[in-house]
Image (cartoon, rainbow, N blue to C red):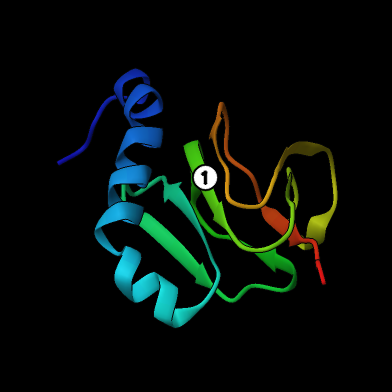
């Protein structure tokens, strides 16, 4: 089922947080992860991400950063283009448009 853009943008952070809470037990065992709502209305997960990761179909909606460092969203692939948002470790954020890649910071 497709949801219209306005509803998806409003509901995305709630949907992502619900998905994160539902999988909290397995997520802790699997390690850090980053979640985003795709243009296919599905939650996508990057497990134990490091460095720069290209993402496909990252639509506007929201992200959840369950890593130990800041995640910086970029407009283009390869962490190029405009830096659209910086999401601190353990935080979530709405996104107003899609992004092409994300760089993960490393903390000690």
Residue 50 percent coordinates (x, y):
72, 74
Residue 15 percent coordinates (x, y):
30, 40
Q: Quadrant of residue 27?
A: bottom left
Q: Nearer the viewer, residue 85 or 82?
A: 85
Q: Residue 71, relative to residue 50: is it above or below?
A: above
Which residue is label 1 attached to? 63
Residue 98 percent coordinates (x, y):
58, 39
In the picture, measured across the screen, residue 85 lies left or right of residue 64, that is right
The count of marks equals 1
Q: Quadrant of residue 51?
A: bottom right
Quarter occupied by the N terminus: top left
Q: Quick one: which residue is furthest to the top in this view?
A: 6
In the picture, measured across the screen, residue 75 lies left or right of residue 23, that is right
Q: Quick one: which residue is furthest to the bottom in this view?
A: 29
Residue 108 percent coordinates (x, y):
82, 72
Q: Quick one: which residue is furthest to the front in this view?
A: 108
In the picture, measured across the screen, residue 77 lies left or right of residue 20, that is right
Q: Residue 47, relative to residue 10: is it above or below?
A: below
In the picture, measured across the screen, residue 64 lies left or right of residue 68, that is left
Residue at the spot x=45%, y=65% of the render? 45
Query: Callout 1 environment at 10 Å: few (<14), some (14 to 19), or many (20+)?
Result: many
Q: Nearer the viewer, residue 74 or 87?
A: 87
Q: Nearer the viewer, residue 83 or 20?
A: 20
Residue at the spot x=24%, y=31% of the render? 3
Circle 1 sits in a helix, a strand or a loop, which is it? strand
Residue at the spot x=56%, y=26% of the render? 96
Q: Residue 40, relative to residue 34: is it above or below?
A: above
């Amino acid at each position: 089922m497709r949801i219209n853009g306005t509803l998806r943008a409003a509901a995305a952070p709630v949907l992502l947080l619900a998905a994160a809470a539902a999988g909290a037990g397995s997520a802790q065992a699997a390690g850090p992860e980053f979640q985003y709502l795709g243009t296919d209305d599905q939650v996508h997960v990057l497990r134990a991400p490091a460095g720069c990761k290209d993402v496909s179909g990252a639509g506007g909606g929201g992200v959840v950063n369950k890593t130990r460092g800041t995640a910086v969203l970029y407009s283009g692939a390869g962490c190029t283009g405009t830096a659209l948002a910086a999401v601190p470790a353990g935080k979530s954020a709405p996104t107003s448009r899609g992004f092409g890649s994300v760089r993960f910071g490393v903390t000690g």
